[in-house]
Image: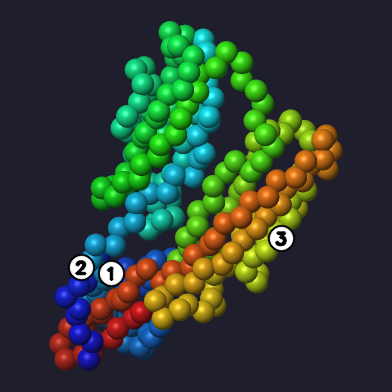
Amino acid sequence: PAKTDPRFAEFVVGTDEAAKAAVRSGVLTPRYVDSHFASVDNVILQRASGINNPPRILTKPLANAKAGTVHTQQLVAVDPDTGTATGITFSPVSVPGGFGISSAGLITWDTSTVLTGDYDITIAAADAAGATTHLSWILSVVDVIMPPPFGIASVPDGDVLIGNEWTYAPSLTGTASGIPIAWSLVDGPQGMTIDPQTGAMAWDSTGVTLSAKGNASFRVIIRAEETGGLGRTAIQEFNVDVENRFDSIDIKLQGNRDQWMLF
């Protein structure tokens, strides 16, 4: 019979339909499912207590703001526990006067009364449970903004729950609109794809062999090349980590039925 580990905290209480929906959506992955699963009356889904990963900020902040204008930028963050931006709120931590960031991550700063120079910025992104990530950078107010160098500006989400699809839509900086770009995958796990025209990436993590610690890491290198214009090239290298973050489901049956553990 299954034993309830005291390290576990209650995650969801519901019916067998709730458990099956969680399994189907990839939130929980069963290693063993009994035929009685369909007739379970009471189900408790559990996860290791204290596991609440902070948001991951995906946007790279702009380094320069032009004096005399309203500087704006939209920051984007994702909750690695859900794979969405739902419930994430942004807030200022240490910013210059007049600098604002909305709860949705929109930066607004009127630099018309700001002296040129470098300004230290720190903002925070928090999920609904309170896990927080801080982002700090130097924002330079300048009279003339030089065009940024050609490069891949976006930051990929480096985590995926085993059995789920990992996706990434890279974006470029420093290239003029209309110049064709050729994208290619230089290195990555088997089955990972990249659209040669848009750079959109996808990878199904089903079937990945995890380590004894319940994770696996894969090195990824992508390349973007201007096939027109100046013919410049940009390379981005990062890791994608596959995890089995949810440790178990304890299915508690009424009466004298057995208990089953799903991992």
> Which kind of residue does numbered mark 2 sit on?
Ala
Name the residue located 50 percent from the left edge and 40 percent from the top edge: 59
Please name the residue that numbered disc 2 is placed on: 9
Question: Which residue is farthest top?
Answer: 113
The vertical placement of 47 against 116, above or below, is: below
Question: Is tag 1's residue or tag 3's residue first in the polypeptide sequence?
Answer: 1
Q: Distance between the residues labelled 1 and 3?
A: 37 Å
Name the residue located 42 percent from the left edge and 24 percent from the top edge: 119
Q: Tell me whether the residue at label 1 lies in contact with that at label 2, contact meaning CB atoms closer than 8 angstroms.
A: yes
> Which kind of residue does numbered mark 1 sit on?
Arg
Q: Where is residue 245 in the image (x, y as percent from the top left)?
A: 37, 68
Return the mark for residue 47.
1
Q: Quadrant of residue 19?
A: bottom left
Q: Is residue 212 in view from this perspective?
A: yes
Q: Is mark 3 on a helix, strand or loop?
A: strand
**78 left or right, relative to 147:** left
The vertical placement of 87 against 148, above or below, is: below
